[in-house]
Image (cartoon, grey):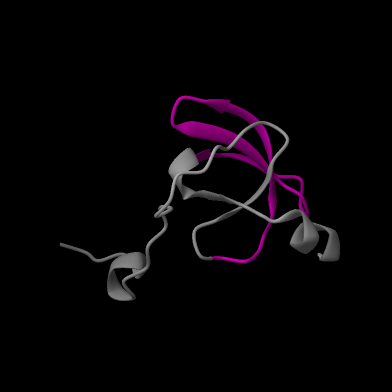
Amino acid sequence: MPLSYSDVFNLRHEREHDEEIAAGDLVRMGENHFPHYAVIAVQGDKAWVRNVTSGEDCLAKVDRCRKIPQAVARAA
């Protein structure tokens, strides 16, 4: 069975705490600090997000989205 990068390096992408993710939030994925994503919409366990640097849209699992504190967002 092939192993993923996450399996080899034992990376956790899901949040370990509850956090409300809503349209308008600025988030990052997993433990990554960049890129930042703007949340466009949330439906069930999926979020439509837009990369704030490239403008590319994608769907992401809500439990992998982590809010970026406003002070950090302004500094970036």
Q: Is residue 5 left or right of residue 26?
A: left
Quarter of the figure that contains the N terminus: bottom left
Image quadrant of residue 42? top right
Residue under the image location 47 percent in, 49 percent down: 64
Query: Is residue 24 part of the magenta span, yes or no?
Result: no
The stretch of residues the image draws in magenta is 32-61
Q: Point out residue 15 in the picture as x, y percentages from the top left corner.
A: 43, 53
What is the magenta segment's predominant secondary structure? strand
Quarter of the figure that contains the C terminus: bottom right
Residue under the image location 37 percent in, 68 percent down: 11
In the image, residue 64 sits, relative to residue 10, either above or below, namely above
Q: Is residue 70 left or right of residue 44?
A: right
Residue under the image location 31 percent in, 64 percent down: 4
The outermost residue toward the left is 1
Image quadrant of residue 10? bottom left
Q: Point out residue 3 in the picture as x, y percentages from the top left corner.
A: 25, 66
Q: Point out residue 65 in the picture as x, y percentages from the top left corner.
A: 53, 48
Query: Is residue 48 part of the magenta span, yes or no?
Result: yes
In the image, residue 36 sits, relative to residue 76, either above or below, namely above
